[in-house]
Image (cartoon, rainbow, N blue to C red):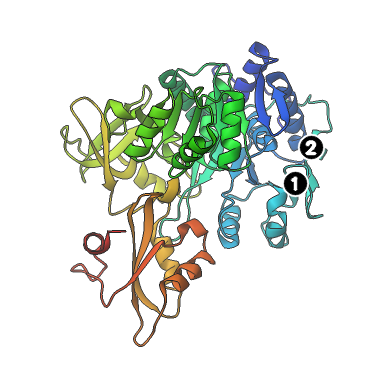
Amino acid sequence: MCEGVKMGLYDYNTYSVIKRNALVHPDRIALISGNKKVSYQEFLEKVDRLSCGLLGAGVEKGDRIGILAQNNMEFVYLYGAAAKVGAIILPINWRLKMEEIEYIIGDATPKVMFVGSEFQAMISPLISKAGFPKKNYSLNHIQISENFIPFNDLMKNDGVCPEVNVSSDDEYVIIYTAAIQGRPRGATITHKNILFFNLQSMYCFRLTAEDVHIVLMPLFHNFGFTISLNVMQAGGLNIIIPKFDVDIALKHIQEYRVSIFGVVPPMLDSLLNKAEEGNYDLSSLRIAVGLDRPDTIKKFEAMTAATFWSVYAQTETTGFVSMAPYFERPGSAGTPGFVSEVEIVDDHGRTVELGKSGEIVVRGPMVFKGYWNLEMDNKDTFRDDWHHTGDMGYLDADGYLWYVGRSPKKELIKPGGENVYPAEVEKVILGHPMVLEVAVIGVPDPEWGEAIKAVCILKKGESLVEAELIEYVGTRIARFKRPKHVVFVSSLPKTQNGSVDRERVKSLYGGA
């Protein structure tokens, strides 16, 4: 512990936001989850007690706090308490397989773990392994296993404890992105990244304390926690549901007069179809943010008084670095935000002329601090004083950003907003005893935006059914990384150096 240390003269962090709201809006409701409602004053009190509990449990500045759980109140309290004590939140995607979760824990080495009751039985076998945290807590007050300490044990104090010097430049969250070359990378986000994203988005979306956000995205996802903290900084209300459920979401949108949410395909389509069936009132909605098909966006705006905002974002940029109402320039990703500098460069890092395609590069206070424990990756990503996104696009004469695809180096597939690198899926498929070669590509998908397709060569004399290979992959890595389509071929096109010619594979088999 750092007794008596105060924040710096020029510092401000996420905990400062919580203190400010408790002062200005003490009785305003900050969080709703099920039947529980918490005011901003109560939120501060709970965060203070949890902070003292964490310090008493041995958590120090810079330590990682692992979280494996669906959305709940305690998840948000931990975001607040980590900000106060200078710890780093490590939210883990609960859709991952055990081996993937074990890798993340081994790489980030959290000091403590918080696990929802729904995942305690699954993760208990890891507890005895070397490197796993010695202190593990039940996140939502329900203990399925004796290996987990009750969450309330951390709250049994008066909330008064030594202050820790937490700078806006300190690490705050590590989000593990898709596995490139077979391993995921932890994108490290600072308090400053979050605060500047919040200010930029608050201005663009005109957010105030009257806004109500329903957390449709998981809080382990960059999209879920950033919009939640954005609305929180504006003094608004966050409605927390455990995971996306169409009926529960529509009920809360109508009851609490929700004004903003973030979505990825096919969430919005599901909401609109169910709303038509049940005659739900969606008139309170002002903004939906994310990605979707033009016909779904048109239907959304016709059914509500709201505007759908298209954006360009990465985990590595904390949030949206460009944005605009979709129909302001249909098909574009909007214009660069007020604290985001965006340029297009060629293979040599030189800025290209307007209208010409190249790699999208970004800089500004929203760019992440770097990948956890990956110095060489950071040098490559941050070369020439820009964050190289690996995405291709162009800027038109009016400054609108147009995304055109991914660079061959990146080869990222995004089914339903999740990030999947082909190399990770290919590695698993090549583990099948009947598969000789494989190329994994992304193909258009009307429901999920993009789907995974595996183009395979089987070993001589072998026979395999598509469904068998899909299930094989789904039992070894997260099921959202399974191919939706599989095709068996006699050969794969190759480049002059003998590697698979991905562009040729896409042209031959890129249809869904």
Q: In the figure, is residue 159 to the left or right of 379?
A: right
Marks 1/2 in contact by CB < 8 Å: the verdict is yes
Q: Residue at x 47, y 40 (%)?
A: 273
Mark 1 secondary-structure assignment: strand
Question: Which quadrant would residue 378 be assigned to in this image?
Answer: top left
Q: Position of residue 56 (x, y in %)?
A: 78, 37
Q: Residue furthest top?
A: 24
Q: Nearer the viewer, residue 289 or 366?
A: 289
Q: Residue at x 61, y 25 (%)?
A: 256
Q: Nearer the viewer, residue 424 or 485?
A: 485
Q: Residue at x 64, y 22 (%)?
A: 18
| Dot 1 alpha-carbon crowd within 10 angstroms: few under 14, some 14 to 19, many 20 or more | many
Q: Position of residue 349 (x, y in %)?
A: 23, 41
Mark 2 secondary-structure assignment: helix
Tell me, for residue 154, which label it has, or none.
Answer: 2
Q: Amino acid at mark 2?
A: Leu
Question: Which quadrant would residue 287 be assigned to in this image?
Answer: top left
Q: Amino acid at mark 1?
A: Tyr
Tell me, for residue 241, which label it has, or none.
Answer: none
Residue highlighted by disc 1: 137
Residue 386 seen in render: no
Q: Position of residue 332 (x, y in %)?
A: 28, 34
Q: Position of residue 105 (x, y in %)?
A: 61, 53
